Image: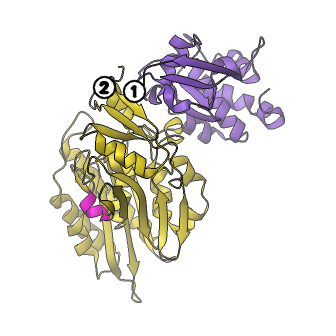
Amino acid sequence: MKPPVFEYASPSTIAEAVSLLASGNGNAKVISGGQSLMPMLAFRLASPELLVDLKHLKNLNAISVGDDGVRLGAKVRWCDIEADQRLARNHPLLAEAIKHVAHYQIRNRGTIGGSLAHADPSAEMPGVALTCDAQITIVGSRGTRIEKAADFFTGPLQTSLEPDEILTEVHLPVWPVARRWAFREFARRKGDFAMAGVALFYDLDEKDRVVDAHIGAIGVSDCPIRLTAAEAALNGNAITEEAIAVAVRAAKSSIDPPSDIHAPGAYRRSLVGTLLARSLQQSAS
Amino acid sequence: MQVEFELNGKSVSAEVEARTTLADCIRDDLRQTGTHLGCEHGVCGACTVLVNGDAVRSCLMLAVQVCGEKVVTVEGLSGDELSPLQASFRKHHALQCGFCTPGFITTAHALLTNEPDADEDRVRDVLSGNLCRCTGYVPIVEAVLDARSHYARRGGK
């Protein structure tokens, strides 16, 4: 359970960090909080030749709330989100989802950038980013690019990040005050990885019909997914017991969750249905 | 690599490999063996220490990451006498084999320092990141709740 041998650097500018990553020829990795990478190193599931620590980089710790939404620097920790009173009002889905991330000690170190870049299929932050059409800012040797969350997650623990790129910020679009939302997940113990989870939001028109439903699920595929069949089933309809039942059927038939030691696929599918029904009921009440 | 940081109020330095975890540096290089290592991958909480006041898992940090920082282990929480929190653990029989205890003490100390009015739900939530195979947790939660008054008054001294 000891990490493999690697070199370590803690550059003071992002340009220097990118250049170090580029020099690693694909064998360098970024570390910050390390709460996902350190276990990977301990199990030797990752064996980089160089770790580039972001600890001295400034300007990656900010949480900003403005007219265009919420911006989170890559080094924002779970405990920073928890402590920021503005987010409960300006992005309640984020604030609620983040309550489920890991345990106390890990929340003091773990960062949103690390969670997004690690891309665990069961993790909350990638699910929130996908559900909310987040935009992810990435800096690399070829400059800065902005990637939609939908294009960022490409597989289990896989993203579109190139070896010489650093995720610097995630932007969640503005959240209307009247928006309806819910986040629910199920894990055997609070703080553990979820067997499945559902994040959703929608707005209501003047006749209380759903407009532009966004429903995401975690823990049921290679990466976070949108339950587009359920979204389509809800759009244009009022949230009634019947509409919920239709959406749940659509969601369950559209997914094919994997089986692992934590839960069989059929159980996860059933769980998504239950979590979606309860989330919709909660959002409508 | 040379690392220098503050450990329990004293400046320390050690020559470590980049891959050396903070836990191994504290135990093997600096010979402070109060910090226990259980799972070594961030699940059991036994290795919890305070870095700049925050409870963190020392198996999930590299020693080189704490250069210039303030680290406190269970040894740093009391002198010759038990701290009120430690005394409360003894009073409530909150340990049996004691392996997990340093992690529980450091975690609960951080919690009560920041939130001396934490209720039982909050204490249980925070301690859920620490595993104990002896006590069944009930006496640990009682011990932490009972120690709160010391933190409200004098920061647990």
Q: Which residue is most to the right?
A: B153
Residue at the spot of label 2:
A43
Disc marking residue B41 = 1
Q: Nearer the viewer, residue B24 or A87?
A: B24
Disc marking residue A105 = none
Q: Residues within 10 Å of mark 1 (few under 14, many from 20)?
A: many
Q: Which residues are magenta?
A: A146-152
Report x, y in % for residue A63.
Answer: 54, 60
Q: Residues within 10 Å of mark 2 (few under 14, many from 20)?
A: some
Report x, y in % for residue B104.
Answer: 59, 25
> How far, Cα to Cα, is label 1 from label 2?
8 Å
**Tag 2: amino acid:** Phe
- Compared to A133, does B113 lie above or below? above
- Marks 1/2 in contact by CB < 8 Å: the verdict is yes
**Tag 1: amino acid:** His
Q: Is residue A94 left or right of residue B72?
A: left
Where disc 1 sits, the SS reads loop
The image quadrant of residue A284 is bottom left
In the picture, one chain is purple; tell me its letter: B
Is residue A260 in view from this perspective?
yes
Which residue shows up at 22% across the image and 62% down it?
A251
Which tint is chain A?
Answer: yellow
Verify whether residue A263 appears in magenta. Answer: no
Is residue B130 in view from this perspective?
no
